[in-house]
């Protein structure tokens, strides 16, 4: 097994040296070919200088600098598309995901022949509000997007690199790697892992950003809001019919003395219902066209430091015995 570790970096100059050191020691001990891809997501501090320095110091480390801050999932996609080895491991840059736990993910991935494995903490490591926001995102993914494994999703994950072939056309500013993986991963598992406390600063992924992420996923990957508009239209229609019956009854019994009130009230309610239903139906189509027509980039790379691994040479080495057995002149 060969492993590419992809880490989105933002305001993490203090933690990267220790993180990379522990990563390389763990992967060396696991005796797997490996690389570490640090994707600096437009961080305004010295994170890029630190990442670039690590890439120049260690041949296994590569650093990618995005032109501005695009968000964690966009940075992850940038790193995943750069990965050269068979398995991709993603983790945070704040040392809350201990590198020493990576072998647990790899063992589950290989032993159970899974496509994707998530590392779930034994205990919740965030505060009440952040945990509530995280559960809201997972509930959104489970309910509106139909992702059955949403409850086990975490940022500490390992998956087979070939899965990225299923979302090569993914574009736009509101990408979600977990939604993209749900399109292609049929065998998904999870393992319990130990999580550490954050050592420096505080998380950049606040509760507000998590709620916004859930909202973006709901609009970008689901037509549920558009269907809700249709349901609202039908509800308004029922209310309009009920209102029409009430005002007609009051007119018949002589309780209504305002001329024209009966017809105007009924027509406004019924036509409002028809308009909402039409908007909902049209929105289903416009939303699908809109998802493919946005031209905003997922990310733009400013610069790279470090030499990528050669997956072609690696594949040739692994399949050399089979190629030699073919004999001269045979394919």
Image: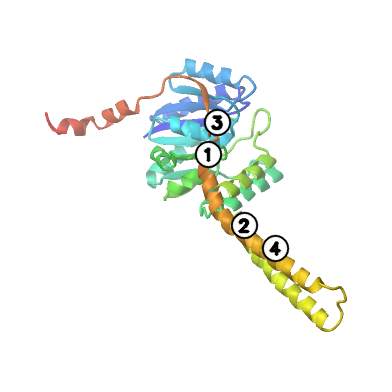
Q: Are marks 1 and 4 in contact (CB under 8 Å)?
A: no
Q: Which residue is disc 1 drawn over?
A: 156
- What residue do we see at 56% from left, 21% from top? 17
Q: Which residue is disc 3 drawn over?
A: 8
Asked where in the image residue 238 lies, by quadrant, the reply is bottom right
**Residue closest to the far front:** 259
Instruction: Note whether residue 212 is visible.
Output: yes
Residue 239 horizontal/vertical position (percent)? 72, 70
How far apart are labels 1 and 4 at the CA level? 48 Å
Instruction: Note whether residue 98 is visible.
Output: no
Q: Which residue is disc 2 drawn over?
A: 279
Q: Is residue 12 placed above or below 241 in the rendered structure?
A: above
Tag nearer the camera, 1 or 4 = 4
Crowd around label 4: few <14 · some 14–19 · many ≥20 (10 Å): some
Q: Decide which of 326, 250 is in the foreground and name it.
A: 250
How far apart are labels 4 and 2 at the CA level? 11 Å
Sequence-wise first label, 1 or 2: 1
Q: Which mark is residue 272?
A: 4
Sequence-wise first label, 4 or 2: 4
């Amino acid at each position: 097994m060969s492993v590419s570790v992809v880490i989105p970096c933002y305001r993490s100059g203090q933690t990267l040296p220790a993180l990379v050191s522990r990563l390389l020691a763990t992967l060396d001990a696991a005796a797997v070919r490996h690389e570490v891809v640090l994707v600096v997501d437009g961080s305004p501090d010295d994170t890029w200088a630190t990442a670039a320095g690590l890439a120049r110091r260690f041949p296994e480390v590569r650093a990618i600098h995005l032109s501005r801050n695009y968000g964690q999932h966009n940075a992850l996609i940038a790193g995943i598309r750069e990965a050269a080895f068979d398995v991709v491991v993603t983790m945070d840059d704040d040392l809350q995901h201990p590198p020493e736990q990576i072998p647990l993910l790899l063992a589950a991935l290989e032993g159970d022949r899974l496509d994707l494995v998530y590392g779930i903490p034994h205990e919740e490591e965030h505060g009440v509000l952040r945990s509530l926001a995280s559960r809201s995102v997972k509930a959104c993914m489970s309910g509106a997007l139909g992702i059955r494994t949403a409850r086990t999703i975490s940022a500490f994950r390992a998956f087979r690199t070939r899965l990225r072939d299923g979302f090569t056309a993914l574009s736009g500013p509101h990408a979600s790697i977990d939604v993209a993986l749900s399109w292609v991963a049929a065998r998904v598992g999870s393992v319990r892992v130990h999580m550490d406390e954050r050592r420096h600063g505080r998380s950049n992924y606040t509760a507000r950003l998590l709620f916004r992420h859930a909202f973006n996923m709901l609009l970008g990957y689901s037509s549920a809001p558009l269907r809700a508009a249709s349901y609202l239209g039908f509800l308004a229609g029922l209310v309009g019919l009920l209102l029409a019956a009430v005002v007609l009854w009051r007119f018949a019994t002589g309780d209504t003395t305002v001329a024209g009130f009966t017809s105007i009230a009924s027509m406004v309610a019924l036509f409002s219902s028809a308009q909402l239903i039409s908007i909902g139906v049209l929105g289903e189509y416009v939303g699908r066209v809109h998802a493919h027509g946005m031209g905003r980039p997922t990310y733009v790379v400013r610069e790279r430091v470090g030499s990528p691994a050669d997956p072609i040479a690696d594949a040739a080495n692994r399949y050399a015995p089979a190629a030699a057995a073919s004999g001269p002149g045979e394919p």
